[in-house]
Amino acid sequence: MPGLPAQADGTQYLGGVQLRFSPRWLGKVRPTHEAVAARRIAELTASRREIVAAYEIERRRIERDLHDGAQQRLVVGLMKLGEAQLSPAVTVDPALAALLAEAKSAIAGGLESLRTTVRGIHPQVLTDLGLEAALTDAVDRVDRTGRTIRIVCPHPLPTMPEGVLAAAYFFALEAMTNALKHAPGAEVTILLTVDNTLRVCVVDTGPGGAYLQPGHGLAGMRERLAAFGGELLLSSPPGGPTQVAAHLPLLLARGESGTGIDSVDSAGGTIGAEGQET
């Protein structure tokens, strides 16, 4: 017993009475401690999920405020400038016409920047239409560069918690951005499959050799994924391909897993086994 003196052989005494501890009694104590530890872990996990959920709610509130407030005011400003450009006074004053055109261009640029910011906070299409549609929208904006980016979703995705959706979306966006930056000219595939786990796998045919840098990019997504019991896996052997995946348990038994994720894993080995990490 902790705090009691013991002889060299480990025997303990209390008031001159030798204490004996039954293995049967000790066996009852250990599970109790394990149960307490398990409960604390569960409480911490639930707390982290609540924090992330609250964070997503706040992100959506900011997105709505920007969309319904600042963005709408800028749109009205553009319309007013357009009306001003039609004024007879402008047609006879080239300097005024140039000034109005410059102001309109500046506001249009600010509006586009604001829209980009709003999409980065929480794209409305993610809430309205789901993960596949939101990623398709993001790819359509990037694919203007002529890059080949495919989204493969063999089966419809089930309804998922907003926090999980946001974590999966921003993970895929970060992985896609990294592929476009570090593997120029490579084909990029975003694979979405789900059973009781949502799997988002981004594969590029670049030269490989990718690794995670602490505190940057994908490494920073680990904490967000971990809040939902998820994990980030990387495989990027020299010569490629690079595969980076997020696995998020959904704790539900609906939806079917596509066959694509299995073929990707078998082609590149167990994801994460070969990736270099720092």
Image: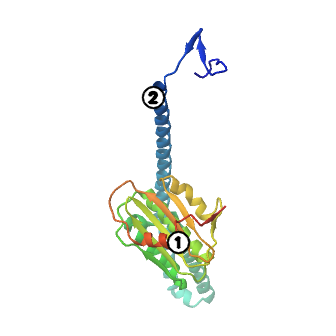
Q: Can residue 8 be seen in this view?
A: yes
Query: What residue sits right under mark 1 in the picture?
Result: 268
- Can you say whether 221 is above or below 29 in the image? below
Q: Where is residue 241 in the image (x, y as percent from the top left)?
A: 56, 75
Q: Say whether residue 96 is left or right of residue 33.
A: right
Q: Residue at x 65, y 63 (%)?
A: 213
Whether residues under marks 1 and 2 lie with C-beta atoms below 8 angstroms apart, the answer is no
Q: Earlier in the sequence, mark 1 or mark 2?
A: 2
| The C terminus sits in image quarter | bottom right
* Image vertical order of residue 131 relative to residue 229, above or below: below
Structural crowding at the residue carrying mark 1, measured as other residues with C-alpha within 10 Å and reported as few (<14), some (14–19) or many (≥20): some
Q: Which residue is drawn at 56% across and 58% down?
A: 222
Amino acid at pointer 2: Lys
Label 2, on which residue? 28
Cα distance in 3D space between marks 1 and 2: 46 Å
In the rendered image, the quadrant that contains the N terminus is top right
SS type, badge 1 = helix
- Percent position (x, y) of residue 259? 39, 71
Q: In this view, does 264 lie to the left or right of 105?
A: left
- The front one of 176 and 30 is 30
The image quarter in which residue 128 lies: bottom left
Q: Where is residue 188 in the image (x, y as percent from the top left)?
A: 52, 77
Q: Position of residue 99 (x, y in %)?
A: 61, 82
Q: What element carries label 2?
A: helix
